[in-house]
Structure formats: structure tokens, C-alpha cells
Amino acid sequence: MATERQKEIKRRRQRRDKVRKLRSQLEKATNPRQRAAIIRKIQSTSPYAPVPEV
């Protein structure tokens, strides 16, 4: 059984990987609506993660 600390570490790693994936999508996106949607997803996933403005 996983300890609370291991669960916390797993959540952080998953969040970091998701933000990394979304940032790569943001670099490729050209449509302003798509960019805004991706930025919203990044902010909802990790509120303190730095993201470029639309």
C-alpha cells in the first residue's frame, strides 16, 4: 500500500508531466482560441505555473 508521501509525490509528477505536455502543445498552437484553452488548462492544473499570456 502506498504511503501518503508516495501519493503526494505521484500527484506532483503527474501534474508536472501534464503541464509539460500542455506547454509543448501551446508552442505548436497558432489559433488564439486554442492557445487560450490550453492556457486555461495549464492554470487549472497548476495555478502557480508560469504561462505566457494570450
Image: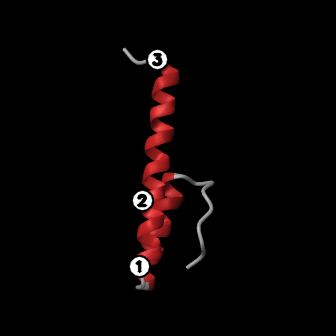
N-terminal label among 2 and 1: 2
Measure how far apart labels 2 and 1 are at the Cα level.
12 Å
Residue ID for mark 2: 21
| Label 1 element class | loop
Measure how far apart labels 2 and 3 are at the Cα level.
27 Å
Residue ID for mark 1: 29
Hey, which residue is sitting farthest top in the picture? 1
Where residue 29 sits, quadrant-wise, is bottom left
- Image position of 52 with respect to 44: above or below: below
In the rendered image, residue 27, in percent from the top left (x then y), is placed at 47, 74
Disc 2 packing (10 Å; few <14; some 14–19; many ≥20): few
Identify the residue shown where x is 41% and y is 18%: 2
- Image position of 31 with respect to 5: above or below: below
Can you say which quadrant of the picture contains the N terminus?
A: top left
In the rendered image, residue 52, in percent from the top left (x then y), is placed at 60, 72
Disc 1 packing (10 Å; few <14; some 14–19; many ≥20): some
| Label 3 element class | loop
Measure how far apart labels 3 and 1 are at the Cα level.
39 Å
Q: Which mark is residue 3?
A: 3
Identify the residue shown where x is 44% and y is 50%: 17
N-terminal label among 2 and 3: 3
Look at the numbered discs 2 and 3 and tell me whether their residues touch, using CB distance below 8 Å. Answer: no
| Label 2 element class | helix
